Amino acid sequence: MPYSHDFFCKIRNDFPFTAPTVIRDGPIIGMGYRSPWVMGNVVQAQTAKDLGLNIMLAQQSLREIERTGRSFFDVINSATAAAYITGLKSAWGADADHLKEESHIEEAVNAGFTHYTYDVSEELNKNPRLVVDKIHRLYRFTSDLKSGSNFTTEISLDEVAENTKLQDVISLLEELRDHKIYPDEIAPRFPGYFEKGIDYYWKIVNGRKIIDLKEITEYLIEINRISKRYGVRISIHSGSDKFSIYPVIAKVLGNNYHLKTAGTFYMEELRVVANHDPGLFKEIFNFSLEKFQEDRSTYELSTDIKNIPDILKLNNEQLFYKTKSCPENNDLRQVLHVTYGSVFTARTDNGDSRFANRIYAVLKNNKADYLKILRAHIERHLKLLDLT
């Protein structure tokens, strides 16, 4: 963005509605936005304004910060600009996601985030007894830095191989209570698979992804009972494009959830590129394919690149369809979905942006189509959640 951080601080001071605040009422929709331009945040803010949604207009994980070369300040400033442009007067929050160390928390606090998600996956994988100690340490550090200012917290248990046992959730919340720590949200590892960029599925049988909602429905019913008993909200990570389970979430959890979305918006931007500049899209895809094995290492994916058609033979209309969120396009979408950081930070031999500026130009030059496509994708989520 062409404006300085001091400029955005002044905007937040002069127009308080452009500053993030604490969101305590659900349901909460996490509108994570990875791209280095503001346009997508504007669509999110306008949608929230039109529909009266509770949203995290600024949501970014540490991993996304590192991969995009952005900062927590950049994320907050983008959301501030969007709130100002749209006149979003209702409260919106800022979620610093998957924080693991004090230094990460300090950056997020200094930037003005209001919701702090503590990632304890490493401790769960090594020694679960260390989990409470880490949460206690990170929570006390956050509290000291906030100096009495309100904030909310979340415990992320989802980035592990095993489903989170319900009794373990109870034990953890009891132990935290003993330390006088009362998290606002908890994100378990649910039954089934919440892969990036594609719909939920239960398991793979003979190479086919099977969507069976029985087990996750039962799990949601039970963990919802636990969450109500302890006064915490259920947080659902990698929640974008999980169309199959949205009606279940709405029915079982009511307003007691926080659904996080992020990369799905970048994917919709690439759909605009595919529709209006297929040559650029094919360049991006080929580059993403080169980077995929490296970039997929921190994600749980079932991608099989052999299922991806030869995109060089497809025209823009075919490319536009092949990038749509639906089962037959899963593998292509995942290649693009997880290589966002490599694409945004790629440089030419003389140091210029290789792709980012060109993507932005396509979106800007086809703004009406871009706004329509992104809004439709957001509303596709919200309709199934019964929020439209």
Image (spheres, rainbow, N blue to C red):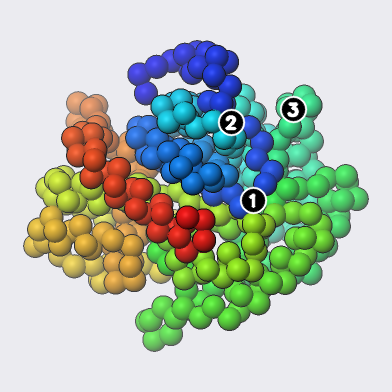
What's the distance in space between the residues labelled 1 and 3, CA to CA?
21 Å
Amino acid type at image mark 1: Gly
Find residue 40 and report its image quarter. Answer: top left
Q: Secondary structure at mark 3?
A: loop
Q: Position of residue 5 (x, y in %)?
A: 48, 17
Neighbour tally class for label 1: few under 14, some 14-19, many 20 plus, Cα within 10 Å = some
- Identify which amino acid the numbered label 2 is placed on: Pro
The picture places residue 129, in percent across and down from the top left corner, at: 80, 57
Which element carries disc 2, helix, strand or loop? loop
Left-right relation of 386 to 311? right
In the picture, the quarter occupied by the N terminus is top left
Visible residue check, residue 272: yes
Q: Residue furthest bottom?
A: 206
Which of pointers 2 and 1 indicates the residue nearer the eye?
Answer: 1
Give the distance between the C-alpha atoms of the residues marked 3 and 2, in whole angstroms. Answer: 13 Å
- Badge 1 marks a residue whose secondary structure is loop
Where residue 116 appears, as percent x and y from the top left, is 65, 40
Residue assigned mark 1 = 26
Disc 2 from disc 1: Cα separation: 16 Å
Q: Which mark is residue 167?
A: none
Q: Nearer the viewer, residue 353 or 269?
A: 269
- Compared with 186, 326 (above or below) is below
- Mark sitting on residue 20: 2
Front one among 114 and 353: 114
Give the image quarter of residue 314.
bottom left
Residue 338 visible in the picture: no
The residue type indicated by label 3 comes to Ser
Residue underneath mark 3? 149
